[in-house]
Amino acid sequence: MSSLLRRKTITTEPGEGEHVLARTLSWPHLIALGVGAIVGTGILTLIGVGADKAGPAVILSFAIAGLICACAALAYAEMATMIPASGSAYTYSYVVIGELIAWIVGWSLILEYTLVVSAVAVGWSGYAAPLLQAWIGAPMALMQGPELGGIVNLPAIAIIAVVAGMLILGTRESATVNAILVLVKIAALVVFVAVALPYFDPANFEPFSPFGFGKSIADDGVERGVMAAAAIIFFAFYGFDAIATAAEEAKNPDRDLKIGIVGSMIACVVIYMAVAAAAVGAVAYTQFANSPEPLALILRQLGQPAAATYLAASAVIALPTVILAFFYGQSRIFFTMARDGMLPAGLAKVSSRGTPVRITLFTAVIVAILAGVVPLGELAALANAGTLAAFTAVSVCMLIMRRRAPDAPRTFRTPLPWVVGGIAILGCAYLFISLPVKTQLWFLIWNVAGLAVYFLYARRRALAT
């Protein structure tokens, strides 16, 4: 029983030889990594899903999800500077709580990152498919998953292969390309706000909350309400946790991690609120609800086809930054768990360029299969379940360390920790309850399978390391 609560000790340079990651990232790379991860499918695609669930009150859904994520981000920033090691919430739980909880959190992170990469690839394809059909006449059957009447989503699979290749080439090189593409994406959103804002009509906000605040079942059987939308839109805000997985590759983790996490979160909250207000104010939400490309659709309905094409092209160019950030985080979670003995140790080997090639290829195969055939909404909802578990764990770890080691060195201290931590924990719990029941069931099944893997394989291997 004691082994289930065994805590991990972190050294300043974990691993040796073929298990050491190269330190190549500075704080601008980390902010770009965070913004690249956060600003993406959530605002470019899921705003349509959220509007379908909450109506104009989708803006309130954004605000609620953003508040909860901001509190979790502060907890992440404190833990990342206290424990500057790869692995994010998995590693913090291993150090603070114990091995079994760490496994559950790590298993949830695997679910989160795998599904996020797949979901963003599907969202990217939603913008790429119309352009490919218009430009080269590509058949839609090969650009959409079965849920939209297609056979397989080839564009989603292709972009995953491209991003995997970038990560294999090198972390710093990938981060530099990512920073450039993030600027392209931000510029496109600025253009959207500038074009849509003159069409702002307060009448589009009436009725503001047609489906109420809490989750409820609508006449068509769909779960709707402000919190039901927030539980899905939550997907749009996380991404800063991918920065925490870069701890061992940051040149100055004590300084760079807190700047990257807090800085990227603040920037993205401002961007999201501006875009959401402009979108809902310009066009009645019923006209873009559930669209795979809602912002481009809004611009076309406003009679701005050139701006719509520019936005869609920018999304095609820049959405891979989200795939890159989460793909990066996924491979580092796998890498750390393999290095700890929880997964096959051979997956933790790195190349001469300091990148984990084997785990990157392994991850690419899994996410490509999911992206090819699974609908976007289901991917996002299940990814949120894994993320909510991780955010809760990090907030709990932060509060435990405030009691266990109140005087331990912290280069970043969360303000009002018990208030901030409480909001994060209770908010995540409420969002989880607001998820579709089917999603909660699948998350339970995933973790039951994870516990079987732990007791049959991981626990024995971890004890031997």
Image (cartoon, rainbow, N blue to C red):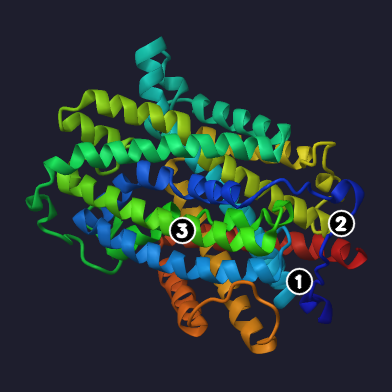
Instruction: Kindly identify the amino acid type of the residue bearing the numbered disc 2.
Output: Gly
Which mark's residue is nearer the viewer, 1 or 3? 3
Alpha-carbon neighbours of circle 3 within 10 Å: few (<14), some, or many (≥20)? many
Left or right of 125? Residue 31 is right
Instruction: Kindly identify the amino acid type of the residue bearing the numbered disc 3.
Output: Met
Rendered residue at 83%/55% (across/down) = 339
Evaluate whether residue 283 shows in this view. Answer: no
Instruction: Kindly identify the amino acid type of the residue bearing the numbered disc 1.
Output: Glu
Q: Earlier in the sequence, mark 1 or mark 3?
A: 1
| Image coords of residue 319 (percent x, y) | 47, 36
Q: How far is the residue under mark 1 from the one under mark 3?
A: 30 Å
Instruction: Find out whether the residues at labels 1 and 3 contact each other: C-beta distance under 8 Å.
Output: no
Q: Earlier in the sequence, mark 2 or mark 1?
A: 2
Quadrant where the image shows the N terminus: bottom right
Left or right of 431? Residue 54 is left
| Image coords of residue 164 (percent x, y) | 65, 34
Rendered residue at 59%/60% (across/down) = 445
Alpha-carbon neighbours of circle 1 within 10 Å: few (<14), some, or many (≥20)? many
Query: Which structural element holds mark 2?
Result: loop
Rendered residue at 17%/32% (across/down) = 301
Q: How far is the residue under mark 2 from the one under mark 3?
A: 31 Å
Residue wearing tag 1: 99
* Residue 88, picture quadrant: bottom right
Q: Is residue 134 above or below residue 344?
A: above
Q: Which mark is residue 15?
A: 2
Residue wearing tag 3: 265
Query: Which structural element holds mark 3?
Result: helix
Q: Earlier in the sequence, mark 2 or mark 3?
A: 2
| Image coords of residue 105 (percent x, y) | 64, 65
